[in-house]
Image (cartoon, rainbow, N blue to C red):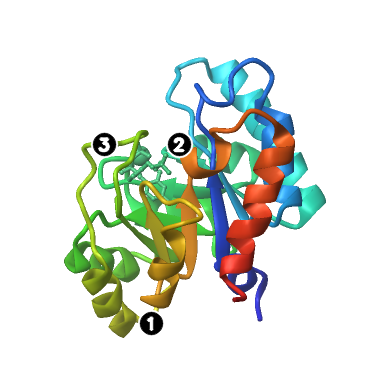
């Protein structure tokens, strides 16, 4: 199995600036990685370029320590600057341009909302994974398009790694795996916690869903 393939299955942790404020970013992310997260997305919408660069570098170092991959949300130039991977939404720039910039070994993922057609287009543009969701009520993105398990079943025909996102918890994640999700991308269900110990326990439990 290639390094990319190895990473494209399991828990996909995504940071949140509000939940991980007050010096929580690094300890909580380390807890998620220690609990088995394979991918960690740095999702920070601020325009503080210097802070974003230093946080992304620190997270990249942490990911390397745990054999995980750091995915930068939205910003292909930040990903290129630190040699990290990338997630692009439909309005975040061209997948082909990102591939040119980051090279063949980078993981590049694409938001496909609840549409198989967007997934086909993303694959044609060399995306390594396709992401559908939200699947449930999401506190982070309540207005995201609602996807369902039928879509996951239909997406099996594409033979491409699938991420499910949106309102995923330890109670509702298994059904998405049963219907074909290869990765579960989680913010609140993982990081809305009082201590890093809880985050690590949850990450371990999410990771176990893939082996049950
Ligand atoms: C794994 C994953 N899937 C979907 C998204 C959403 O991306 P996007 O639609 O660009 O929205 P923002 O996250 O940028 O607000 C994601 N970030 N990660
Ligand atoms: C970024 C994004 N895209 C669709 S739902 C979502 C938010 C996921 O966060 P949570 O796990 O807290 O619902
Ligand atoms: Mg985006």
User: Which of the marked residues, 2 or 3, is nearer the chain's N terminus?
Assistant: 2
Give the residue at mark 2. 75
Camera-side residue: 191 or 6?
Answer: 191
What distance separates the C-alpha of mark 1 from that of mark 3? 29 Å
Q: For this view, does 36 lie left or right of residue 182?
A: right
State the residue at coordinates (76%, 41%). 61
Kind of element beneath mark 3: loop
**Residue at label 1?**
159
Quadrant of the drawing holding the N terminus: bottom right
Disc 3 target residue? 142
Q: Is residue 16 left or right of residue 211?
A: left
- Locate the C terminus by quadrant: bottom right
Look at the numbered disc 2 and give the secondary structure of its residue. loop
Quarter of the rendered structure image containing ligand 2: top left
Residue 58: where, in percent of width, then height?
73, 32
First reached walking from the N terminus: tag 2 or tag 1: 2
Side (left or right) of 206 relative to 60:
left
Q: Is mark 1 within 8 Å of ligand 1?
A: no
**Residue at figure coordinates x 39%, y 69% from the top left:** 175
Q: CA distance from mark 2 to mark 1?
A: 27 Å
- Disc 1 is placed on an element classified as loop
Q: From where the camera sits, is residue 36 visible?
A: yes
Q: Where, by quadrant of the figure, is residue 22 drawn?
A: top right
CB of mark 2 within 8 Å of CB of mark 3? no
Direction from residue 113 to residue 27 in the image, left or right: right
């Amino acid at each position: 199995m290639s390094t990319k393939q190895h990473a494209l299955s399991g828990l996909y942790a995504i940071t949140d600036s509000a939940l991980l404020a007050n010096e929580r970013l690094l300890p909580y992310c380390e807890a998620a990685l220690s609990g088995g997260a394979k991918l960690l997305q740095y999702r920070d919408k601020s325009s503080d370029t210097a802070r974003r660069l230093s946080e992304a570098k620190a997270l990249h170092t942490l990911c390397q320590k745990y054999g995980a991959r750091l995915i930068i949300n939205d910003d292909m130039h930040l990903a290129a600057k630190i040699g990290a991977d990338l997630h692009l939404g439909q309005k975040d720039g061209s997948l082909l341009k990102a591939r040119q910039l980051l090279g063949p070994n980078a993981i590049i993922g694409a938001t496909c909302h609840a549409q198989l057609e967007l997934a086909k287009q993303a694959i044609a543009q060399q995306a390594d994974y396709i992401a559908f969701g939200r699947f449930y009520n999401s506190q982070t993105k309540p207005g995201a398009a609602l996807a369902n398990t039928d879509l996951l079943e239909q997406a099996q025909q594409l033979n491409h790694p699938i991420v499910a996102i949106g309102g995923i918890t330890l109670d509702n994640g298994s059904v998405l795996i049963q219907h074909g999700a290869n990765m579960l991308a989680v913010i609140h269900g993982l990081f809305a916690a009082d201590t890093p110990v809880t985050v690590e326990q949850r990450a371990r439990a999410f990771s176990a869903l893939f082996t049950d």
